[in-house]
Image: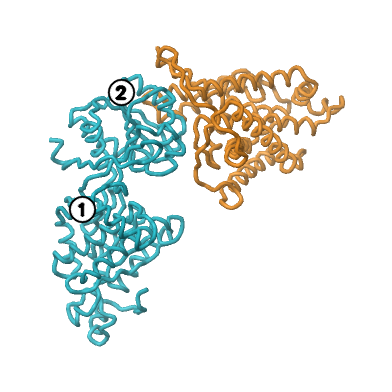
Chain colours: A cyan, B orange
């Protein structure tokens, strides 16, 4: 809980009051006694409501990072303070939450929701205020298109297409792949078009593309057409409810090749629906607790000790988000939002739990993805795939 | 050629399920002259009964005995449900205009959907996995791959259609149904208990929908409270296509819709699948307003 420091101050009035009332002073203050004050970072998320799990796991990841940073002496000699606002998973609430963080709490940076829609709501406010916002898990490309103050620590949706193209070509040695695309989902279309381009660039051929509409349950016709086109594998970027049925029907039709998907497949329901037919399915994720990298193992251990439960992918991403923001403040040598923004944009090879993170020119994290394979009815960590620089490899 | 045959097989096994649902629409239309829009939700409940048979009553999975028992249970429960819906919602409106009953049917449909979506008294809104009722195996015939589930769908549909044909054409109650459908007033004049026959028709149609629900879920093992809407709509189109009120017409319409959908889905036009199915309906209605097998009746005014 943060102490009650409410009061509607305009920036100007606030500045004049700051000398009198040091408690109220925001982080942008150059005056006063900055060393005594905590650096305030805002976090808005779905801490309650239908996606409370997402928000709470985000909060836990950020909290662990916060405690570790402060235990190690803070940033620039000052403590970090995390100010949390709940949007209750409700449309419209994220804007209100961020307004509070910006105008009342004067945070120097904001950690965004893991949901793209709610980041799209709050992002323009941060952009207008010039305060950098970093989302741990919003994968929709539009999020960082808001402006130069909006960042993400996860990879984008289309980026997975590049990851899977490299995985299919190099790790599985495939040369003929068929696409099964949800024509009603920009997510699926985006992944498919990147996959098509990158798979061809790496020397493979996309033999055939079949489409379906979201909510469809029958994929036999499309799969039959793909199978007849002589493919070695299917790439079907989709969500788990379609994915499970696609896996089941592909095997029903006697197709035995690898089935490639996207991070939308990461749900226990995929295994429940597909049952034994999920064997041989591969998809990329942001984080796997089975990764044996000592950094990951250490994080898992500390997280379990602190919260008495294992972290989810978004916990790891939120942990990295706060660590990255702290790192940017250190590199900027200042708690000035524009300086932090510039430092964030200049992030290169930041070693996080979810991989080495570099910010590209569109403020999207460029980092390796973890490939999950289904073995014996469970999601198994397979390998880490770095697709390289998407802009460079296609030339 | 192999691809063509495989698509025919895919289309027929999908169409068989549409046919089962379409029969319920067409039978109710035959006796009451209205479209029972709650029919697609009875179909959905059938799938959930099949799910509960395994998850709650612990019927064996991956066995033909257990699968058929779940199927029979779903048919019985849905038959009872169909009768209850008829008694509660439609019977009090027996002498009202068809439009009133039609709107009530939509209301019943929404009621069932919303109650089912409620997590405390219903099933909750999230899709859940449907267990493997029948042993799932693939049989290879030349280049063709047939799954046992598809064979089960076809076999069960053929048996149910045969039984239905026998009931409608060879039993007293079936004769009464046909009489009622032909002329309700005259039927009651010769001593047919119309209410009983209407209940029986609902039971029969709902049992078929229940079977359809279980078979659909066996082939597409992800079920949710709104799963009935789209197949229900397709089956309705199938019933109209074949000639509403006409039993063989409903079966033929179901098969045709299943085949058209499958063949469209296998081409570049796949996203226009529903549009093409409905365009065919419009074309049929333009050139044969009574449907493929229906007979046009001139209504005297």
Measured Cα–Cα span from mark 2 to mark 1: 36 Å
The residue tagged with tag 2: helix, strand or loop?
Answer: loop
Quadrant of the rendered image containing residue A7 = bottom left
Left or right: A343 as drawn, with respect to A244: left
Q: Can residue B12 be seen in this view?
A: yes
Using a 10 Å C-alpha cutoff, classify the residue at mark 2 as few (fewer than 14 neighbours), some (14 to 19) or many (20 or more).
many
Quadrant of the rendered image containing residue A102 = bottom left
The percent position of residue B63, horizontal first and vertical second, equals: 57, 28
**Residue closer to the observer: A285 or A344:** A285
The residue at 48%/18% (across/down) is: B9
The percent position of residue A388, horizontal first and vertical second, equals: 17, 42
Q: Is residue B89 above or below residue B188?
A: below
**For the residues carrying marks 2 and 1, which lies nearer the camera in this image?**
2
Q: In this view, does B6 lie above or below B277?
A: above
- Residue A231, numbered circle: 2
Badge 2 vs badge 1, beta-carbon distance below 8 Å: no
Instruction: Judge if badges 2 and 1 mark residues of a common chain.
Output: yes
- Residue A363, numbered circle: 1
């Amino acid at each position: 809980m943060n102490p009650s420091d409410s009061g509607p101050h305009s920036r100007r009035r606030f500045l004049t009051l700051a000398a009198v009332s040091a408690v109220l002073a925001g982080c942008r203050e150059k005056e006063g006694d900055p060393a005594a004050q905590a650096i305030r970072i805002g976090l808005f998320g779905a801490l309650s409501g239908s996606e409370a799990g997402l928000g709470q796991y985000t909060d836990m990841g950020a909290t662990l990072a916060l405690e570790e940073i402060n235990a190690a002496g803070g940033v620039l000699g000052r403590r970090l303070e995390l100010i949390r606002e709940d949007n209750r998973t409700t449309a419209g609430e994220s804007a209100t939450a961020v307004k509070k963080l910006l105008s009342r709490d004067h945070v120097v940076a904001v950690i965004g929701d893991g949901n793209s829609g709610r980041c799209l709501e709050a992002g323009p406010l941060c952009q207008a205020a010039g305060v950098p916002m970093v989302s741990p898990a919003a994968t929709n490309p539009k999020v960082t298109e808001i402006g130069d103050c909006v960042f993400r620590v996860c990879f984008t949706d289309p980026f997975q297409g590049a990851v899977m193209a490299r995985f299919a070509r190099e790790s599985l040695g495939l040369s003929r792949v068929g696409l099964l695309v949800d024509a009603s989902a920009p997510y699926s279309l985006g992944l498919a078009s990147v996959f098509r381009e990158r798979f061809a660039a790496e020397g493979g051929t996309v033999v055939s593309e079949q489409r379906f509409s979201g909510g469809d349950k029958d994929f036999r016709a499309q799969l039959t057409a793909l199978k007849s086109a002589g493919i070695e594998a299917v790439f079907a970027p989709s969500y788990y409810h379609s994915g499970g049925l696609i896996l089941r029907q592909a095997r029903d039709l006697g197709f035995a090749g690898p089935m490639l998907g996207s991070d939308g497949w990461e749900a226990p329901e995929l295994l429940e629906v597909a049952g034994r037919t999920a064997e041989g399915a591969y998809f990329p994720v942001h984080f796997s607790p089975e990764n044996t990298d000592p950094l990951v193992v250490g994080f898992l251990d500390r997280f379990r000790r602190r919260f008495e439960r294992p972290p989810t992918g978004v916990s790891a991403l939120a942990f990295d988000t706060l660590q990255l923001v702290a790192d940017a403040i250190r590199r900027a040598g200042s708690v000035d939002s524009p300086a932090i923004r510039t430092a964030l944009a200049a992030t290169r090879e930041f070693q996080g739990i979810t991989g080495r993170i570099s910010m590209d020119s569109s403020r999207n994290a460029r980092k390796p993805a973890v490939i999950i394979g289904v073995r014996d009815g469970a999601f198994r960590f397979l390998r880490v795939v770095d697709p390289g620089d998407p802009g460079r490899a296609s030339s | 050629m192999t691809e063509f045959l495989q698509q025919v097989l895919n289309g027929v096994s999908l169409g068989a399920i549409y046919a089962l649902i379409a029969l319920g629409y067409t039978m109710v239309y035959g006796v009451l002259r209205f479209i029972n829009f709650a029919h697609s939700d009875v179909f959905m409940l059938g799938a959930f009964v099949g799910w509960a048979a395994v998850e709650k009553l612990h019927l064996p999975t991956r066995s033909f005995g257990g699968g058929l028992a779940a199927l029979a249970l779903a048919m019985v429960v849905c038959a009872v449900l169909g009768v209850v819906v008829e008694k509660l919602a439609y019977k009090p409106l027996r002498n009202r205009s068809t439009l009133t009953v039609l709107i009530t049917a939509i209301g019943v449909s929404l009621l069932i959907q919303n109650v089912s979506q409620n997590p405390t008294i219903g099933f909750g809104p999230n899709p859940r996995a449907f267990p493997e009722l029948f042993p799932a195996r693939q049989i290879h015939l030349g280049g063709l791959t047939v799954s046992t589930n598809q064979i089960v769908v076809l076999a069960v549909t053929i048996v149910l259609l045969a039984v239905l044909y026998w009931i409608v054409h060879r039993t007293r109650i079936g004769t009464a149904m046909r009489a009622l459908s032909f002329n309700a007033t005259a039927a009651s004049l010769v001593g047919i208990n119309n209410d009983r026959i209407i209940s029986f028709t609902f039971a029969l149609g709902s049992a078929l929908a229940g079977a359809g629900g279980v078979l659909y879920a066996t082939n597409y093992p992800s079920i949710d409270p709104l799963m009935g809407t789209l197949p229900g709509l397709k089956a309705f189109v199938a019933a109209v296509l074949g000639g509403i009120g006409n039993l063989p017409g409903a079966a033929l319409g179901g098969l045709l819709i299943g085949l058209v959908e499958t063949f469209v889905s296998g081409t570049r036009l796949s996203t226009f699948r529903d549009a093409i199915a409905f365009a065919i309906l419009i074309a049929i209605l333009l050139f044969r307003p009574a449907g493929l097998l229906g007979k046009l009746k001139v209504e005297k005014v």
